[in-house]
Image (cartoon, rainbow, N blue to C red):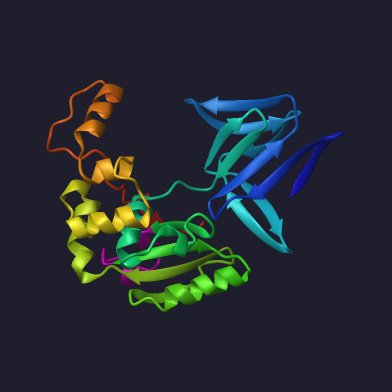
């Protein structure tokens, strides 16, 4: 989708995935407003077109998709990434536990339609028990999305699906009994204490390398510990895990997001 802002000067918006939009432009001067080193607004020719907490609407084959901007990242002088959310800890550590053995993110369109995963969902108290996970997808009218929906609904951990609004489809998945203790450990931020099977599932799902940060977190590596100590200018006790514990508010979907 293109937006004309001046003679021969345009902005081009392209959907990257269910969370992010790519903004490209050919404007020489862009006014960028920052707060605490974070971009909060970008304006072209003094027009405040994109701001944090504002909506961006994109038309795809006659269907409108609304992205609420949560973060703006400058990629280079002529492009920005507009993100509607950051991946939750549930998406990173818990989703692999409900997707099955030998499954990877590709099979779940993680970098295409997937929006986020949540441990809790507003108004769904029946399933907000720590034993279920909500997989939220941005709905697109396509054969690929329909095949994804069939794939998920046939999974043994699938419970039910519902649509909270016209933008999203939600799949409720049950966390297998064999991983419920691991899930509780993850919720406490005890990533290195989960079982070897759970660690393998997480690493395999994300196709993570043995030297990846994810692998270092799960195995509480000395290499990552030393790196964090340098960045934070402090000493980290040996028994402390190397990633913050999940924030329950961030792991909950609230209507209006």
Looking at the image, which residue is at 74% across and 50% down? 1
Note whether residue 161 is visible: no
**Does 194 appear in magenta?**
no
Question: Residue 108 is drawn in which quadrant?
Answer: bottom left
**Does 121 appear in magenta?**
yes
Instruction: Work out whether 25 lies above or below 146.
Output: above
Instruction: Work out whether 228 lies above or below 14.
Output: above
Q: Where is residue 129 in the image (x, y as percent from the top left)?
A: 27, 66
Nearer to us in this view, 53 or 89: 89
Instruction: Work out whether 113 lies above or below 1.
Output: below
Note whether residue 135 is visible: yes
Specify start and end residues of the magenta stretch as a single range. Answer: 118-131
Nearer to us in this view, 216 or 178: 216
Looking at the image, which residue is at 38% across and 55% down? 91
Q: Position of residue 206 (x, y in %)?
A: 37, 53
Instruction: Work out whether 216 lies above or below 117.
Output: above
Question: Residue 7 is drawn in which quadrant?
Answer: top right
Looking at the image, which residue is at 22% across and 64% down? 179
Looking at the image, which residue is at 47% across and 73% down? 162
- Classify residue 21 as left or right of residue 185: right
């Amino acid at each position: 989708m293109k937006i004309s802002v001046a003679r021969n000067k345009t902005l081009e918006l392209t959907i990257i995935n269910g969370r992010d939009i790519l903004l490209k432009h050919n404007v020489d001067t862009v006014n960028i407003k920052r707060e605490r080193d974070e971009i909060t607004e970008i304006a072209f020719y003094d027009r405040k077109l994109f701001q944090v907490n504002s909506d961006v609407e994109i038309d795809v084959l006659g269907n409108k998709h609304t992205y609420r901007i949560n973060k703006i990242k400058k990629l280079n002088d002529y492009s920005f990434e507009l993100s509607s959310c950051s991946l939750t800890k549930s998406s990173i550590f818990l989703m692999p536990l409900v997707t099955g053995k030998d499954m990877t993110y590709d099979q779940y369109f993680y970098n295409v339609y997937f929006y986020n995963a949540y441990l809790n969902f507003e108004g769904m108290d029946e399933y907000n028990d720590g034993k279920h996970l909500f997989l939220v997808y941005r709905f697109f009218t396509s054969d690929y999305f329909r095949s994804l929906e069939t794939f998920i609904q046939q999974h043994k951990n699938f419970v039910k699906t519902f649509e909270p609004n016209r933008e999203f489809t939600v799949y409720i998945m049950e966390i297998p009994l064999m991983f419920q203790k691991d899930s509780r450990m993850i919720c406490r931020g005890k990533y290195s204490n989960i079982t070897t099977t759970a660690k393998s599932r997480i690493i395999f799902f994300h196709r993570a390398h043995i030297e990846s940060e994810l692998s270092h977190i799960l195995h509480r590596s000395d290499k990552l510990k030393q790196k964090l100590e340098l960045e934070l200018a402090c000493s980290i006790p040996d028994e402390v895990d190397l990633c913050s514990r999940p924030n329950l508010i961030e792991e909950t979907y609230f209507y209006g997001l």
